[in-house]
Image (tube, rainbow, N blue to C red):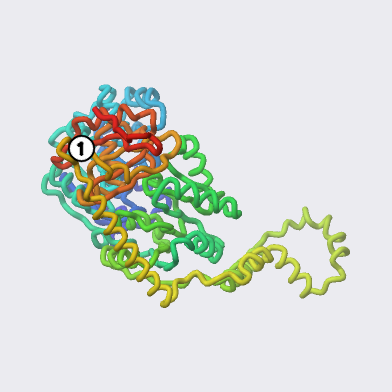
Amino acid sequence: MITFEETGLKPEILKAIKAMGFESPMPVQEQVIPVLLQQNKDLVALAQTGTGKTAAFGLPLINDIDLKNKKTQALILCPTRELCIQITKDLDNFSKYIPGLIITAVYGGASMDKQISSLKRGSHIIVATPGRMNDLIRRKKTDISAINSVVLDEADEMLNMGFQEDLNTILAQTPNEKRTLLFSATMPKEVSLIASKYMNDPIEITVGKKNAGSENVSHIYYMVHAADRYKALKRIADVNPNIYGIIFCRTRQDTKDIAEKLIKDGYNADALHGDLSQAQRDQVMSRFRVKNLQMLVATDVAARGIDVDDLTHIINFNMPDELELYTHRSGRTGRAGKKGISISLISIREKSKIMIIEKMINKKFEHKQVPTGKEICEKQLFNLIDKMEKIEVKEEQIDQFLPDVYKKLEYLSREELIKKFVSAEFNRFLEYYLNTPDLNISGESSQHDDRRNGRENRNREERGDRRNKYERTEKGEWGERREKGNRNTEKGFTRFFINVGTMDGVQPHRLLGIINEVTRDRKIQIGRADIMQKFSFFEAESGYTETILKAFHKASFEGRKLNVELAGEKGSGDGKKKRF
């Protein structure tokens, strides 16, 4: 194991590292830093979130900056505003003792004019989100034609969020003679394509195994009926009184619903979803970072780039549609050498997903029983005792009240006094969990569920057969099949039909990416999506209806012409569709 001094970094950087309390490089830093300092080659590094990737690429970049050259020399692209800000703060700390080195962050949701002013004054390193960087390039407000290094941080996340076209546009503006560094937690085919298109014989460094989970994370699953998920979630929170974690839901509406229920039931929780303004999002994240919130309920998209230390738990209220996202979720805990727990609430039919993920991360899940009321009460009781043991007594402030307190309680024995003080906090758990049912799926109910799921699968197949009867006619009309997708649309949103589905490899995150790529407008809020076998439905803000229809008029997906139309609204009569 090498030290930071042995890597060859400048004394000013070593001084900053020491001031930050870094003693020795983390594995990804140990492998990447010497390579970047000694070789001017492209590099692909695969490592989990929270393993020290920012220092791995940031320290060599700062080390190689020519302060006499006022032009931008390095560009770092990352998926979200939060991650952009975090990387910039880290780089500022690394370069604390290098006067004159300028680092600029550019991202959406903030004043573009201020960012343009900063860029005009000159910047050695730009840290940017792809959307905002592309806007600045289009407006000719930044020049990256002379850079010598590009970093794609969390490349898989950027592609999942639909930034493929932005990345292509940005990279096309950079010189051919540059070094490209790609950092990613997973290596899906889309990331491999970027590597093959924009990199020249890159060095590949893998910390752990490809797509593997963090060694510091324990993986647990509880098997419950879908209707009992929320009850199970509460029990997990109650049996872990000091929980500090993120609860992942599949949809924005689920996120709102679960957060509202938790708040109503007295938990320190809040939601993070696409309906929040940037100011509201910042407020929620600020409360979460200082631990005023114990639990943050979020979708995968809303949680992109969240960088919070010391998370104890990740809870998968719903398993992700794209199983590789599990690695990103679980990687948010167990960071910086600390232990973490990733919990999944699954139904019988989702057991196969656990087996797939086990192979993917090369780790076994532990199947646990949902805690009983008795177990929770015991855990809460001793947590209360621990708190009472460790509480700091402010002698000077409380002494003046003690004589009256002693007098009021003098009739109680020591044992009675302890019982009453404990019960004051503990009774609500005793009352709530008195005679509560077992939420675990027993062997008998498992067989029942298997039979029920078999019936549901057969019913779905029959519905699919009926739906497949309604193909496009010779006149090009869409028949009764389209109306099967009608449903009540969320207020302020319009429902669209699109002619791609699961057989085209489309999942919810990919559909979002297609919409982003075609419309080139990430301000559009996308609501619920239903992915069928041959087609899909999605909801989008009604104010962008014309924009979406026009954008898709001549759009294609993997060589196939896309057809997007308004889905028949409930009660709309003949259900005619508007098209361009």
Above or below for 521 versus 528? above
The answer, for residue 34, to whether it is visible in the render is no
Amino acid bearing label 1: Leu
Question: Image quadrant of residue 326?
Answer: bottom left
- The spot of residue 551 in percent (x, y) is 25, 30
Q: What is the count of numbered marks?
A: 1
- The spot of residue 452 in percent (x, y) is 37, 67
Residue extending furthest toward the front? 574
Q: Is residue 231 left or right of residue 164?
A: right
The answer, for residue 129, to whether it is visible in the render is yes
Pick whichever, 430 or 295, lies toward us.
430
Residue tagged by mark 1?
Answer: 562
Pick whichever, 230 or 288, lies toward us.
230
- Residue at 33% across / 34% down in the picture? 574
Above or below for 565 versus 43? above
Q: Is residue 80 left or right of residue 438?
A: left
- The spot of residue 78 in percent (x, y) is 31, 41
Residue extending furthest toward the bottom? 443
